[in-house]
Image: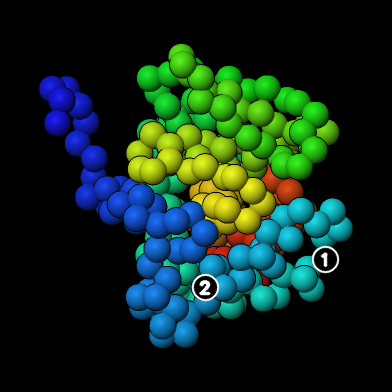
Amino acid sequence: MKAGAKKVPKWESELWGYLSSGDGMQCPTYNRCQHRLKGGWCPSDNLNRITCLLDDRQFKISKYSFIGRKGDAQFCGRVFRLVERLAEEYLRRAGVHCLPVPAEIVSLADEQHPVEIRPLALRTCHGAIWHLKDGWVIQLKASDTSRKKRFALFHEAFHILAHRKASPVFRKRDYETGAFNELLADYFAGCILMPRKWVREKWSEVKDLSRMAETFDVEESLMWIRLRELGLT
């Protein structure tokens, strides 16, 4: 370890180790995940359905019933729990103490290099990243709503973290390649914008989807997915 370098926590090393050992297509712990093997709900088994929901322009609660189970104490397996812990640490370092989570903290994805945000007329995706010699560029779909842009922003922030911490880096060569990594990036963005503790507290107060989405400044569909993940609906 270089002098002055920060020691990486054991749990974080475990996360990047999993991602480095995987192919980006499937969860690297899929065949040995105790949560899944014991009958727990697995996002990896529902990857394509979740992806379709995120791109669906018409939000209908009935389409989301397959996500998780109401009252579940544990939503998913080890890799996802580590990603959520990463999001919680990200928020702690950013010093976020109120809602909505500010988009400006995306710069923490790489504290040594600048992160520039550029809205562009993207057609096939909501966001993308470019690693330049002296920093990063996050491209966001200009026609998206501000709430969708916020989600895409932190989705791409996860990819920056993964490029910096995991080896080999993620390279999405086509629509299918990197599907599991895309799911993890979505989950990270959701955990950043809708922290578990605050979602539980606010939901117990308001029990109203529209008000929740407004409070957290996210799309109603994303808010509903998070509520399902936490077993609250």
User: Which SS class for mark 1?
Assistant: loop
Q: Identify the mark at residue 28; answer none if there is no mark.
A: none
Residue receiving disc 2 = 42
| Residue type at numbered disc 2 | Cys
Q: Earlier in the sequence, mark 1 or mark 2?
A: 2
**Crowding near pointer 2: few (<14 within 10 Å), some, many (20+)?**
some
Q: Is residue 207 left or right of residue 192?
A: right
User: Which residue is located at x 40 percent, y 63 percent?
Assistant: 28
User: Which residue is located at x 54 percent, y 68 percent?
Assistant: 44
Residue receiving disc 1 = 60
**Can you tell which of label 1 and label 2 is closer to the viewer?**
2
Q: Would you identify the image quadrant in which residue 220 lies?
A: bottom right
Colour style of the rendered protein structure? rainbow
Q: Would you identify the image quadrant in which residue 91 lies?
A: top left
Work out which quarter of the rendered image holds the C terminus and state it. Answer: bottom right
| Residue at the top extreme of this rendering | 134
Front residue (pair 188, 121): 121
Seen in the picture, residue 106 relative to 42 is either above or below; the reply is above
Residue 113, image x and y in percent?
43, 18
| Residue type at numbered disc 1 | Lys
